[in-house]
Image (cartoon, rainbow, N blue to C red):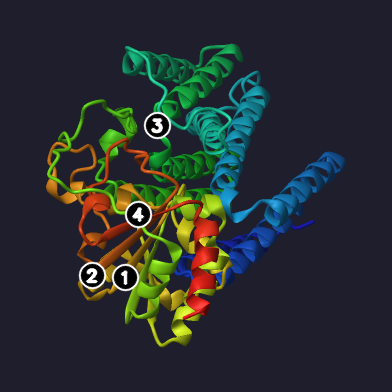
Amino acid sequence: MISNPNVIGLLYLATIVCFILALRFLSSPRHARRGNWIGGVGMLIAIGTTLSLDGIGNWWLIILGGAIGTVVGVVGARTVKMTAMPQMVALFNGVGGGAAALVAFAEFHRLAPLPGKIGGTEVVSIVLSALIGSISFAGSLIAFAKLQELIGGRPIVFPGQNVVNGAIVAAAAAAGLAAIAGVQGQWVIVLLIALALTFGVMFVLPIGGADMPVVISLLNAFTGLAAAATGFVLSNTVLIVAGALVGASGTLLTLLMGKAMNRSVTNVLFGAFGQIQAGTGSARVDDGRTVRATTPEDVAVQLSFARKVVVVPGYGLAVAQAQHDVRQLAELLEEKGIDVAYAIHPVAGRMPGHMNVLLAEANVPYDQLKEMDEINPEFPQTDVALVIGANDVVNPAARSDPSSPIYGMPILDVDKAQSVVVMKRSMAPGFAGIDNDLFLEPQTTMLFGNAKDSIVKLIAAVKTL
């Protein structure tokens, strides 16, 4: 057992340094694996140090819980497909919030009956941990259910929803203030948790699938804040710092995702965003333009005689699990001396970095993954833009139609390429529920069908040229 506070402090300091370095390396796909390893080492030091403290008991429960968690984590990491990674992240994030809420409840149960044992700092921390952790837990479960298509991905709304949500928040705040004021009885913290769980469900229900990158980032920040509050409850420095790091990084990521989707933080928190508004956007005028379908053979000719090709991946690529085939196609084109790059929109998937992870799994070179600001100036010099399953993030209405629900959203300037090939199953609109004028542009052709099947046909056709 470790009883020397200096040794404990040094070990926790090593953990904190590991977490900070992990975040640093995770900022780039090239170094993300190293960041994961460093973060894992830091967590191992934190767990080992905590279990070595004086007063730790119930070893059988600790061993049992650790074994269950290890099995779930290993099985999840090994068996969950990359296309299902967003829902796994949402689920694991919710588990973190739920753990924080349970610790808060356990500490309140232990300290509340003892006169003078629970001070102002402790009770405030308990209330915040229970409140935020419960919201994160319930909200993450709903996000998981939407991503897993256990419930509809479209927004679920009803009249007066914001009023109901406001009433739930007010009641939860009242319960929290009652606990802080010293109202006796554990019913106060139970009521607080129940109201927070209800609000977590109501908070995520009106959010559509297209906005999941924002809500996942936001819930991740909530979990970090709940963990930091739990650190104050337990007087654990490393938990405070780790929670603060997660909360800060999650908040920053939420702001970046909101900017990428042209949404303010206020809209994220209170606007029931993600609702599809019927009748928004300008009505399509029949100006004589038509959708032009193409064949894999024709597209193969365009690609084979191009100088520069930009691949624009979207969620359709993830659903079809076509990332390995895309990489094979790119290798064939590179053998012909063609410059191939990948245009990555910040929200081109179900979570931040989703496309980067999918393409990295297929061993796409990191230097070919271009962020939006980097690739947009290159589209005018691009011979062929190959759009695979992306929709709203390439819709020119975001620049030109003030009445469109996506107006102002930063998009990939695909329409500026010399030729655009869009691979889709059908002409169905994206998550925003609006038509895409890109499909009617004279330089655009549509290759209909499953993305994986279409790319396999493209590969075969390119090999014959």
Badge 4: residue crowd in 10 Å (few <14, some 14–19, many ≥20): few
Q: Which badge, 1 or 2, is on the more N-terminal residue?
A: 1
Amino acid type, mark 4 = Ala
| Number of the front mark, 1 or 3 | 1
User: Circle 1 is placed at which residue position?
Assistant: 384
Q: Which badge, 1 or 3, is on the more N-terminal residue?
A: 3
> In 3D space, how far apart are the residues under numbered discs 4 and 1 (Cα atoms)?
16 Å
User: Circle 3 is placed at which residue position?
Assistant: 207
Q: Position of residue 38 (x, y in %)?
A: 60, 68
Q: Is residue 174 above or below residue 12?
A: above
Discs 1, 2 touching: Cβ within 8 Å: yes
Which residue shows up at 27% across the image and 74% down it? 382
Q: Is residue 257 left or right of residue 317?
A: left
Q: Position of residue 317 (x, y in %)?
A: 49, 55
> In 3D space, how far apart are the residues under numbered discs 1 and 3 (Cα atoms)?
35 Å
Can residue 389 be seen here?
yes
Question: Considering the numbered disc 2 on the image, is that residue within a helix, a strand or a loop?
Answer: loop
| Number of the front mark, 3 or 2 | 2
User: Circle 4 is placed at which residue position?
Assistant: 293
Quarter of the figure with the N terminus: bottom right
